[in-house]
Image: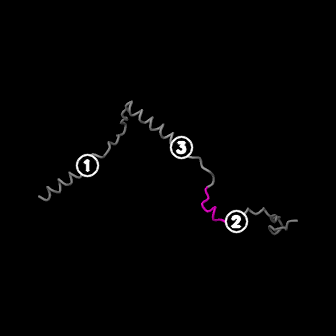
Amino acid sequence: MRILFAAIMIAGLAGPAYAQDKAVPRYGETDKEKTAQEKQTERDAEKAYQRSLGNIPAKAGANDPWGTVRIEPPPKPAAASPTAKKTKTSSGTATQKPQ
């Protein structure tokens, strides 16, 4: 009796799960043609989507959440300082001081 009850419970739970499964197209199987109403519904949805994109405001600029917390402006990059030139000598390379 327990086995019969367990089999009925498994079948009862598997039925709704099986019904939710969409049919997976097999290899070489063609998609069925859409009806005129389905095509019109897709066009209307696409137009509504494009209209909704127009309602999004343009970005106002850089988003700096810590901008109001900073007291000083950010430091400017330092100017390039003259670097020592390397010259070849008989023993290898040596550096010269800029003149």
How many numbered badges does the structure rendering display?
Answer: 3
To which residue does mark 2 refer?
Answer: 72
Give the amino acid type for the residue marked by disc 3 in the picture.
Answer: Asn
Name above or below for residue 16 compared with residue 80: above
Discs 3, 2 touching: Cβ within 8 Å: no
Q: Which mark is residue 55?
A: 3
Other-residue count near label 3 (Cα within 10 Å), few / some / many at <14 / 14–19 / ≥20: few
Q: Which residue lies furthest to the left in this view?
A: 1
- What residue range appears in magenta? 63-73
Element at label 3: loop
Q: Earlier in the sequence, mark 1 or mark 2?
A: 1
**Residue 30, x across and y down, in percent:** 37, 35
**Residue 12, x across and y down, in percent:** 21, 51
**Residue displayed at 80% across by 64% down:** 81
Give the amino acid type for the residue marked by disc 2 in the picture.
Answer: Glu
To which residue does mark 1 refer?
Answer: 16
Other-residue count near label 1 (Cα within 10 Å), few / some / many at <14 / 14–19 / ≥20: few
> Quadrant location of the C terminus?
bottom right
Name above or below for residue 84 compared with residue 19: below
**Residue displayed at 27% across by 45% down:** 19
**Residue displayed at 14% across by 58% down:** 3
**Residue 52, x across and y down, in percent:** 50, 42
Q: Which sits in the foreground, 99 or 39?
A: 39
The answer for how far apart the CA atoms under marks 3 and 2 are is 37 Å
> Quadrant location of the N terminus?
bottom left
Which quarter of the figure has residue 96?
A: bottom right
How is this picture coloured?
A: one colour
Magenta-drawn stretch contains 78: no
